[in-house]
Image (cartoon, grey):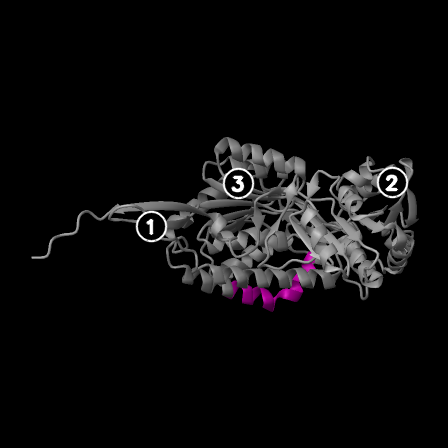
């Protein structure tokens, strides 16, 4: 993983330059200087990966009934990744920009995911069903075949393996398309998987433009399912292709997550959790807690606590010592975030802290946006309704539970929500009424490989993670056997 590394496409048993042999530079978002080159795939490369995957299923042991064999390989892969955790974390940080401490946590989560799904690989089973007459009725679960996984750029490896891991555990071959902006750890992981004993072709990695490679993979007749994490518009386009082919699509399409803080909450803990939920990964999170909804009696105190935290955060390159927030991932993303902040100003919002590009000359070459808090915005503002994907928090106040829930649910998204209260009745009532697939109480955004990750409304379809994650990459078959009349005893 040297700074001059070259990354190809992983198709079958080879790493190759791609059909057109085109490469593009990969930029460090802290400096916007190139530090690697990556092959650019196209529709022909997508087709080659799908062909290789189908062939691998027929020629290897991977799709057999013996899930224990897959489990051993996945555990070995988890061990290899854990041994190289620091190298992967550094590569992730250099490619995406987040602080190294966050990347270490992300890679650790991937290790744990692989360990968890390895434990599921030999536990995918059917059931017997009582039916009338002298019959035996049972179900089996079979791998779908070749599954497609289209990953986003904000958690490059974690959100790739969140779906690839269960698909492999269930006996499928997986073709992964990482985001063009941040493909490096996915390619490095593909190399590691091959070395750990994943058969050639069972995992392919094809980087390239999302507008061409992604649709080509889903349109391919070998695609049996697709998992997509990314923007709503791109997800809808992928879902339309999948629907025409009548293949299942799992979609995680983002959010505009509320944090509801009641007056009895521990405000110091809440402020730290709120700051983590919006300034972690520079706010580039699908479940970023970007809307603070706080009781009027404590609004000023809590906003001031969050402002103090935001102002004290140390910005810088993710690899630098003590950095607490890195750059956003690209110049385009920086312009997008600053554009939303400017629209917030135009809509009457008050910038409590931040609101601009970082002024430190040492950070001038990078994509650094100051952590920002805005108050006084109308609910119709695009900064309130749209997923900004940056370190921008909008704050609102409420008088009672009904008003808090109304404000929180006033969005087309429903991925995540948080509640801060010492009163369990209040907390559970709020959790029940919030239109979100995941709710945390007195906790910053948190998830585990064993907990389902899913959203309501336009945040997506289906789920990732959890004990049934591998089963979601199988098809159920029902078998009924007529046992006939019992033979008379002689």
Q: Tell me if residue 177 can be seen.
A: yes
Q: Which residue is mark 1?
A: 130
Q: Is residue 1 visible?
A: no
Which quarter of the image is occupied by the C terminus? bottom left
How many numbered marks have been drawn onto this rendered protein structure? 3
Q: Earlier in the sequence, mark 3 or mark 1?
A: 3
Q: Quadrant of residue 115?
A: bottom right
Q: Position of residue 325 (x, y in %)?
A: 80, 57
Q: Kindly state the secondary structure of the residue where label 2 is placed.
A: loop
Q: Is residue 404 left or right of residue 51?
A: right
Question: Where does residue 484 sit, x and y in percent of width and height?
Answer: 19, 47
| Residue located beneath label 3 in the image | 46
Magenta region: which residues? 76-92
Where is mark 2, residue-wise? 377
Q: Residue at x 16, y 51 (%)?
A: 486
Report whether 157 appears left or right of 364.
left
Q: Earlier in the sequence, mark 1 or mark 2?
A: 1
Real-space Cα separation, disc 1 to disc 2, in angstroms? 59 Å
Q: Secondary structure at mark 3?
A: helix
Name the element at disc 1: loop
Q: Is residue 388 magenta?
A: no
Residue at screen point 80% across, 56% down: 274
Asked whether, in this view, residue 330 is left or right of residue 311, the answer is left
Foreground disc of the pair 3, 1: 1
């Amino acid at each position: 993983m040297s700074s001059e590394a070259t990354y190809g496409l992983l198709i079958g048993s080879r790493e190759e330059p791609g059909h057109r042999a085109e490469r593009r530079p990969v930029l460090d978002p802290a400096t916007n200087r190139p530090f690697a080159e990556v092959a650019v795939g196209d529709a022909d490369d997508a087709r080659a990966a799908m062909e290789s995957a189908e062939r691998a299923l027929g020629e290897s042991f991977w799709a057999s009934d013996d899930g224990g064999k897959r489990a051993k390989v996945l555990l070995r892969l988890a061990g290899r990744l854990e041994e190289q955790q620091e190298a992967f974390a550094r590569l992730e940080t250099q490619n995406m920009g987040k602080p190294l401490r966050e990347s270490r946590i992300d890679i650790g989560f991937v290790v744990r995911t692989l360990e968890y799904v390895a434990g599921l690989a030999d536990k995918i089973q059917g059931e017997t069903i009582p039916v009338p007459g002298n019959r035996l009725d049972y179900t089996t679960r079979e791998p779908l075949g070749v599954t497609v996984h289209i990953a986003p750029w904000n958690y490059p490896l974690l959100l790739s393996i969140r779906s690839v891991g269960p698909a492999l555990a269930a006996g499928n071959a997986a073709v992964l398309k990482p985001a063009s902006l941040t493909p490096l750890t996915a390619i490095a992981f593909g190399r590691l998987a091959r070395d750990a004993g994943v058969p050639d072709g069972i995992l392919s990695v094809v980087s390239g433009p999302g507008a061409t490679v992604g649709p080509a993979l889903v349109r391919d007749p070998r695609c049996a399912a697709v998992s997509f994490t990314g923007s709503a518009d791109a997800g809808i386009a992928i879902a339309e292709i999948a629907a025409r082919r009548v293949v299942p699509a799992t979609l995680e399409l983002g959010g505009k997550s509320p944090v509801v803080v009641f007056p009895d909450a521990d405000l110091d803990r809440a402020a730290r959790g709120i700051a983590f939920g919006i300034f972690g990964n520079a706010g580039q999170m699908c479940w970023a807690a970007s809307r603070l909804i706080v009781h009027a009696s404590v609004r000023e105190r809590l906003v001031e606590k969050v402002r103090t935290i935001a102002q004290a955060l140390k910005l810088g390159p993710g690899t630098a010592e003590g950095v607490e927030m890195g750059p956003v991932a690209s110049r385009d993303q920086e312009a997008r975030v600053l554009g939303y902040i400017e629209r917030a100003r135009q809509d009457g919002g008050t910038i409590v802290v931040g609101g601009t590009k970082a002024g430190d000359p040492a950070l001038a070459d990078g994509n650094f946006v100051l952590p920002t808090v805005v108050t006084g915005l109308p609910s119709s503002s695009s900064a309130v309704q749209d997923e900004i994907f940056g370190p921008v928090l909008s704050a609102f106040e409420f008088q009672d539970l009904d008003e808090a829930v109304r404000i929180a649910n006033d969005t087309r998204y429903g991925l995540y929500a948080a509640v801060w209260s010492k009163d369990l009745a209040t907390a559970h009532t709020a959790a029940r009424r919030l239109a979100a697939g995941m709710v945390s109480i007195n906790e910053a955004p948190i998830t585990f490989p064993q907990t389902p990750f899913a959203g309501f409304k336009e945040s997506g379809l289906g789920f990732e993670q959890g004990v049934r994650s591998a089963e979601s990459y199988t098809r159920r078959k029902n078998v009924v056997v007529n046992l006939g009349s019992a033979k008379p005893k002689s």
